[in-house]
Image: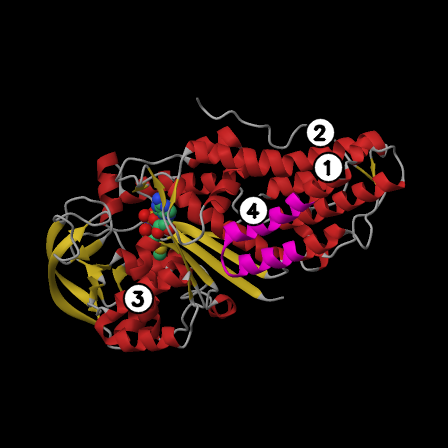
Amino acid sequence: MANFSLTTPIYYVNAKPHLGHAYTTIIGDALARWHRLMGDNVHFLTGTDEHGLKIQQAADDAGLTPIEFADTIAPQFKEAWAKLNISNDDFIRTTEPRHYAGVAKLLQACYDAGDIELDVYSGKYCVACEEYFTDEELEDDLCPIHKRPVEYFEEENYFFRLSRFQDRLLEWYASHPGAMTPDFRANEALGLIRSGLRDFSVSRTSLTWGIPLPWDSKHVAYVWFDALTNYMSAVGYGTDDERFNEWWPVDYHLIGKDIVRHHCVYWPAMLMSAGIELPKGWGIGGWLLSGGEKMSKTSGNVVNPLDLVDDIGVDGFRYYVLAETSFGQDGDFTYEGLLTRYNSDLANNLGNLLSRVATVVDKKCGGIGPSPAADSVLATAAESAWQDTAAAWHSLQPSKALEATWSLIRATNAYLENNEPWKSEPGEAVDRVMGDALEALRIVAVLITPAIPQTAQAVWERIGMPGQVSDQRIPAAAAWGQYPGGATVTKGDPLFPRRQLPA
Ligand code: MSP
């Protein structure tokens, strides 16, 4: 069994989980579930980023100590992910002892390599980004990301000599084409490296809420150095070498376009300095915008994903997130868009197919599903649907994967419309059509498992298949002809009742 590991960013605990956080996490979850379906041994990591000035300030505002404050927010992320049916294998908090051990070890390794040195730094700092900006990078003197004023800081800091890594990073990426995906985001990252790299400070003396440097405890680690290390500390770096060797390097870091500099420039340089293998891949997503702006607590335009789940159901929401935008591009969240997609793809296509099949089997086949024909026209549609679905997941294109899966749903609806089994007398001809449709639905149930797992199981049970659809393995389970004739097909309520668009 091959290992496959992937990570989401770890989310700042200054805010409750919002739609933007859910976006990256759902994509990670679907990919993790796809790989489990392929028989891989999967490790899917998420967590919370709990140190730094931003959290310290949020705690101060709430009248709590930073850890008390983090303790109120971190469980809300865990609960949100449980509600969104996120199948993470671990959840790391950067305030855990295992993480402290990993950060101390990595800092020491870079220090011993001579790449961390003491220096004085002054500059303009955006607390929301936890990042310094040059005057050229600012827009009207405001942070280009948060559109907020920056603060002038001057500190004696330890610096990571990033400037030494420009050529090595460019060479590494040149010899690992496709490591960052999609291509246009990779080009943006390479542009950052080509435009010249500034050393960055890896320590702070102006705050105490962080991990002390192992060789100079007056300083705490810069929150980004601390945070990035979660990807290794969670799998044993600093505490369990055997486990670390089993899971490192990671297959994919899923990140948003706002944190490319940290993940695709700082992080690989830090690893090179410490002599650690680089990640195998980075998946760089766009933003889910709301009213044309990045959704963020700071911008005050957040949509609570849990409200949407209560409204449209967990799978309706997951489907929207995965299908609506092509990974890497920005998407604009609208409630109308959510309902439109729900009505067309889930209610009309998938829901309708299942209810049609169940109704005809009930009326014409006594509620018992007939077996499929080996030479059905749908067999070819099923073959290309699963091949294309697989190719799209493997190239990190969830929306394409769903389009490919939906091609089988559409082909099956068209097959029913061409044959109109509801108009025929019970008999061999109807049985043949319905056996084929049930077999197509069986394969659809398998293929939708990563995106909409509850629905997949519901379809599986309604067509009379035993056990858990998530225990199926592709490619075996995608091969045509396995629906066992003789299973009981259940009609049940509509899976996705149609929704009215707001007037
Ligand atoms: N804590 C850092 C990440 C450290 S990873 C070692 C951080 N946290 S964050 O909570 O502000 O945002 C993390 C990620 O959430 C973003 O990079 C992005 O992947 C995702 N998103 C947050 N808002 C988003 C949108 N509006 N749209 C899509 N994703 C967004 O940065």
Is residue 141 in view?
Answer: yes
| Position of residue 255 measured from the top left corner of the image (x, y, whole percent) | 39, 55
The answer for how far apart the CA atoms under marks 2 and 1 are is 8 Å
Is the stretch drawn in magenta largely helix, strand or loop?
A: helix
Left or right side of 74 for 389: right
Tell me the residue at 66%/34% (across/down): 352
Residue 399 lies, with reference to residue 494, above or below; the image says below
* Residue where numbered disc 3 is placed: 265
* Residue where numbered disc 2 is placed: 492
The answer for how far apart the CA atoms under marks 4 and 2 are is 22 Å
Q: Amino acid at mark 3?
A: Val
Residue 383 lies, with reference to residue 81, above or below; the image says below
Dot 4 or dot 2, earlier in sequence: 4
Classify mark 2: helix, strand or loop: loop
Does the magenta portion include 278?
no
Tell me the residue at 38%/58% (across/down): 230
Q: Amino acid at mark 4?
A: Ala
Left or right side of 282 for 395: right
Looking at the rendered image, the quarter that the C terminus falls into is: top left
| Position of residue 303 measured from the top left corner of the image (x, y, whole percent) | 37, 35
Q: Amino acid at mark 2?
A: Gly
The answer for how far apart the CA atoms under marks 4 and 1 are is 19 Å
Question: CB atoms at circles 4 and 2 under 8 Å apart?
Answer: no
* Residue where numbered disc 1 is placed: 462
The answer for how far apart the CA atoms under marks 3 and 1 are is 49 Å
